[in-house]
Image (tube, rainbow, N blue to C red):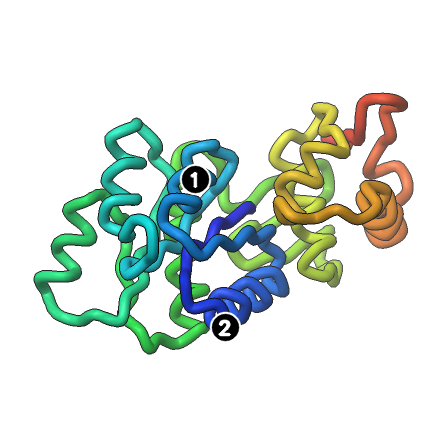
Amino acid sequence: MRLLIVEDEKRLAVSLARGLTAEGFAVDVVHDGLEGLHRASEGGYDLVILDIMLPGMNGYRVCSNLRAAGHEVPILMLTAKDGEYDEAEGLDTGADDYLTKPFSYVVLVARVRALLRRRGAGTAAPVLTVGPLRIDTAARRVIRGEDEIALTAKEFAVLEQLALRAGQVVSKAEILEHVWDFAYDGDPNIVEVYVSTLRRKLGAATIRTVRGAGYRLEAK
């Protein structure tokens, strides 16, 4: 899942990005409302974490502009303000949830996961069954038979992208886009490294390489 953080408090933004990256999300960060609107308008994000007090354009206007343009990406608003009026204004502009600073990081992650589950309701099952594998996208667990297979956050994220399109070819570029962040400029062969690790843990025949096209998680 790919997240966008729009937050002008740079230390907070970096802290959130590091934590959410460790949870297995691909995270992009911007510190200006206009840049946030531009990035979010380009699409490709599964959720936006949006501060209200921003330079360039405040979060209320960013949110209302996105909704007016037809973008339905879930938006979690952050603000140092408090009170029912501020919360109501945020929700009235189209935000899906609201969190007042200071907040617990654990609560933020729970809100993010809840919004992502809500967005996926009716479009993707929380538990994906692919052959002998059961992949619980909410609990982030992989079960084969009676055994749980331990995966790192990034390994799970790569497997999830393949499982969502089991039996279909998923390109290396598509995996990079959804598992690594926008600013990633390292070796794209990092995908091959994680696929190799997954094969060791899940079985060599579980993930097939389709030469010149990408990878396919076998549904058999």
Q: Nearer the viewer, residue 206 or 196?
A: 196
Q: In what quadrant of the picture does the C terminus appear?
A: top right
Left or right: 66, with 218 as reference point:
left
Q: Nearer the viewer, residue 89 or 136?
A: 89
Inspect the image, locate mark 2, and give the three-letter code of the amino acid beneath it: Arg
- Name the residue beneath numbered marker 1: 40
- The reply to whether residue 130 is in sight is yes
- Image x and y of residue 136, in percent: 58, 51
Whole-angstrom CA distance, mark 1 to mark 2, is 21 Å
Q: Considering only vertical position in the picture, is 105 above or below 66?
A: below
Inspect the image, locate mark 1, and give the three-letter code of the amino acid beneath it: Ala
Residue displayed at 87% across by 30% down: 209
- Image x and y of residue 177, in percent: 65, 39
Residue displayed at 86% across by 22% down: 212
Q: Nearer the viewer, mark 1 or mark 2?
A: 2
Residue displayed at 59% across by 57% down: 140
Q: Nearer the viewer, residue 40 or 154?
A: 40
- Name the residue beneath numbered marker 2: 11
Numbered disc 2: secondary structure: helix
- Image x and y of residue 61, in percent: 24, 45
Residue displayed at 34% across by 32% down: 71
Sequence-earlier tag: 1 or 2: 2
Splitting the image into 4 quarters, where does residue 113 fall?
bottom left
Near mark 1 (Cα within 10 A), the count class, few <14, some 14-19 or many ≥20, is many
